[in-house]
Image: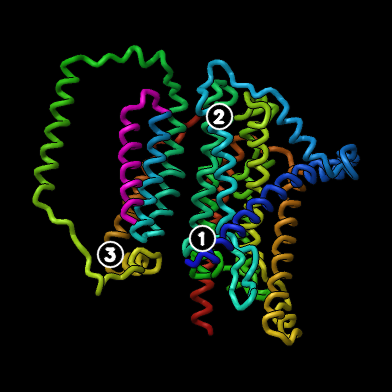
Amino acid sequence: MTSLFFFLASLTLLCALMVVISKNPVHSVLFLIITFFTISGHYILLNAQFLAAVNIIVYAGAIMVLFLFVIMFLNMGKESEQHVKTSTLSKIAGTLAGGLLFVVMIAALKDSKIAGYDPETYNSQIGMVESLGKVLFTEYLLPFELASVLFLVAMVGAVMLGKKEAGEQHF
Amino acid sequence: MESVDLLYKGIYILVIFGITLLIATYSTYFERKIAAFIQDRVGPNRAGPAGLLQPLADAGKLFFKEDFIPAKSNKALFVIGPGIAMLVATMSSAVIPFGDMLIVGGREIFLQAIEVNIGVLYVFGVVSLGVYGLMIGGWASNNKFSLLGAIRAASQNISYELAMGLSLIAVLMLTGSLSLREIAAQQAGFNWNIWYQPLGFVIFLVCAFAETNRTPFDLPESEAELIGGYHTEYGSMKLGMYLFAEYINIFVASAVMATLYFGAYNFPFMENLREAISDPVLANNVVTMVGVGVMFAKIFLFIFFFMWVRWTLPRFRYDQLMKLGWQILIPLAILNIILTGGGILLKEYLF
């Protein structure tokens, strides 16, 4: 199990790095999809099968398809990349900012303890659909309903923005 | 898991893989035969008796064609595209229960490759990944018609996935389980889900047509407007794999519909058959084997239906397709959920 975890973790980090490093945006998106798959693998290691499946359906199956869709339309080839020039100043600034964030993260994580688990009270079924549904509809009912209202508002906003003007015909 | 179980699982997965490929191969033959019958022709009849060796001849021809990669394409992705399409197509048959339990030498053998408690979600996730093969292939070809085909495939899949998921939810409300084995077991005898979910089944069927890119929803490859759609630049066995993946998808979609709505391996009077045989082990095995036969009969009926529709209905226009998906199927699916919920509550209230 431990070796599987380390294999998955290193694969996740490698793919996540490749998202940033890749020159071609389509390659970046494809590496991001592989990253989502490895994260789903982590969920399965934690015995959270439902989250793993939903992660793949929502992120890899729907959102990343839309990402890929938009990037394919933009058609950023080799020509457009040559125009982008990063100045030395912003390179230095980026390195500094990234390094500072790294220091902050190390400072924050230095004294933190890894939360262990008690084998006596640990419930291995906690990530299954049944227990998740029970928790969502009893203990966390209000945040759950509020999140759904938020989604509804976002959807209405998207419909408003996408609505055609009167008299205009696109096809 | 014991090593015997592991060995059995390995053999079972290989058998299902082989059956999937065989059915996909012969779907091409029957597609042409059915098209010929509908158009009052003879169809392929040269290779072998009644043209039965035609799929082998087609495959041989595809293998001997030149394996061509366009000069300005993205070569790695161009090769990976058909591979992804094929890989994803063969993945989803893993959770489908093709039969109940066999008892061999006191050992219970389930005719299902893997039993996960999220079986429906697994199928749904794999189906939603199917579009990547088309998108990557279409984009990597560096051809505007391919790209248009790929983009049509992407938007069509996303639009119909929503209605498909909503129609699935109504089934899940009835069964109260995400496990396909559980759903199949609950439909014992003639207690099929289709009697409770006729509207949900129609929505699911339409969405299955759209997800497998079959006529009347085959706009990603409509030859009249897009030459060949996403596989315009493909030739040889890479094209073969795209076409093959489509037939595997039809097989899987048929199997899922048979499992969710038409009672999977269950058939009427199966309990009478079980009681008619005195030896309980033999009775169980006979019922299971008949059940496997019934399951495949249902799958073949659905495959035939896919082909029947292809050669009967004309293609949609693209805006009609989007309108059907967003403005008709999704509201209908939500109505179906409300009706199902009301029905469940009414049943609890009355009985």
The label shown at residue B79 is 2
> Marks 2 and 1: CB-CB under 8 Å?
no
Residue B228 visible in image: yes
Label 3 Cα crowd, 10 Å radius (few <14 / some 14-19 / many 20+): few
Q: Nearer the viewer, residue A47 or A142?
A: A47
In the rendered structure, which segment of residues is drawn in magenta?
A1-26
Label 1 Cα crowd, 10 Å radius (few <14 / some 14-19 / many 20+): many
Mark 3: which amino acid? Tyr
Instruction: Tell me the element at label 2.
Output: helix
- Using the image, name the chain to which the residue with label 1 belongs: B
Specify the color scheme.
Answer: rainbow
Where residue B36 appears, as percent x and y from the top left, is: 85, 41
Residue hosting label 3: A140
Mark 2: which amino acid? Val
- Using the image, name the chain to which the residue with label 2 belongs: B
- Residue at 50 percent of width and 27 percent of height: B76
Q: Main secondary structure of the magenta part?
A: helix
